[in-house]
Amino acid sequence: MQILLTNDDGIFAPGLAAIYKELIKLGDVTVVAPAESQSGASHSVTLHQPLVCNKVDINGQFTGFSVQGSPADCVKLAVMQLCARPIDLLVAGINNGANAGINVYYSGTVAAAMEGAFLKIPAVAMSLAAEEKMDFENAAGYCAKILKKLMPLKSGEVININIPQLSKGEPKGIRVVPQSSKGFDERYIRQKNEQGRTVFQLAGGPHRADDTPTDTTSLVEGFITITALAPDMTNHEKTRRLQQIKW
């Protein structure tokens, strides 16, 4: 099996190295990842300048392609130029911090998986809930076990996996749940910078509560969450109603 591994924390991120060790047990792994952290890059792509790409040694463990671009750039470049063989599976992660709820839209990790879906490649995004000490090695073990049960994925499918904080003990189990759309309790804090200018720092608390189990609530409760995502953002029910109007 030909596997493409990418992330949004940068090619030297420990989460990428941890899942690489598990993926090489399943097939041939090609690493193509951003040269630097692209957290929050969402699905941005580089349009007006060429991409700088270098082959690098990753902490003496393996080599990969370092790209001066976004996670989506990495996937497109890998598929169209860098990978000699067709890709059977795309893995994005393991991200430093959960990608659940509306974070799915901001996430470069999930965007990389979605880019795979656009290119008809089965894709899995993997993330670990943030805490002071991140146990990526243990998280990679959980992700690998889930990945084996998920296989084979169909062309263009996207699965989003989130691992809860592992310092609190073993996960309570696995929940297959929908993505929450409640969002955060957010606000901007007005500040003065060193030049005396007024600036605004985004801040906020936890996700707003859901009435039924979702990825955000289940993750807080200590469960591993699995959410099937789709690249089609169409509201099909509303579209059908709009089609009934005599325009």
Image (spheres, helix red, strand yellow):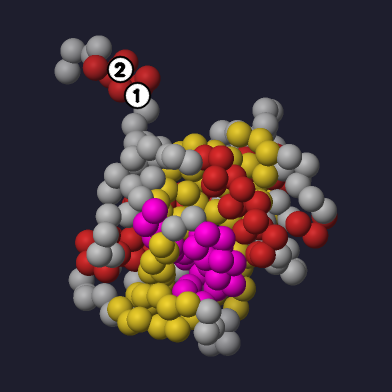
Can residue 228 be seen from the camera position used here?
Answer: yes
CB under 8 Å between discs 1 and 2 = yes
Rendered position, 83 above or below 172: below
| Quadrant that contains the C terminus | top left
Is 63 positioned to the left or the right of 95 in the image? left
The residue lying at 52 percent from left, 65 percent from top is: 20
Residue designated by label 2: 240
The residue lying at 49 percent from left, 63 percent from top is: 24
Q: Residue furthest left?
A: 247
Q: Residue furthest right?
A: 168
How far across and down, in percent of the image, does residue 170 sit?
79, 50
Marks 1 and 2 sit apart, C-alpha to C-alpha, by 6 Å
The residue lying at 22 percent from left, 76 percent from top is: 50
Is 243 magenta? The answer is no
The residue lying at 39 percent from left, 66 percent from top is: 30
In this figure, what is the number of numbered marks?
2
How far across and down, in percent of the image, does residue 131 sit?
73, 63
Query: Looking at the image, which is closer to me, 116 or 232?
Result: 116
Span of residues in magenta: 1-25
SS of the residue under disc 1 = helix
The quarter holding residue 18 reads bottom right
Disc 2 packing (10 Å; few <14; some 14–19; many ≥20): few
Query: Looking at the image, which is closer to me, 124 or 244?
Result: 124
SS of the residue under disc 2 = helix
Is 155 positioned to the left or the right of 129 in the image? left
Query: Looking at the image, which is closer to me, 50 or 142?
Result: 142
Is 20 magenta? The answer is yes
Three-letter amino acid code of the residue under disc 2: Arg
Residue designated by label 1: 236
How far across and down, in percent of the image, does residue 176 sit?
61, 34
Can residue 44 be seen from the camera position used here?
Answer: no
Three-letter amino acid code of the residue under disc 1: His
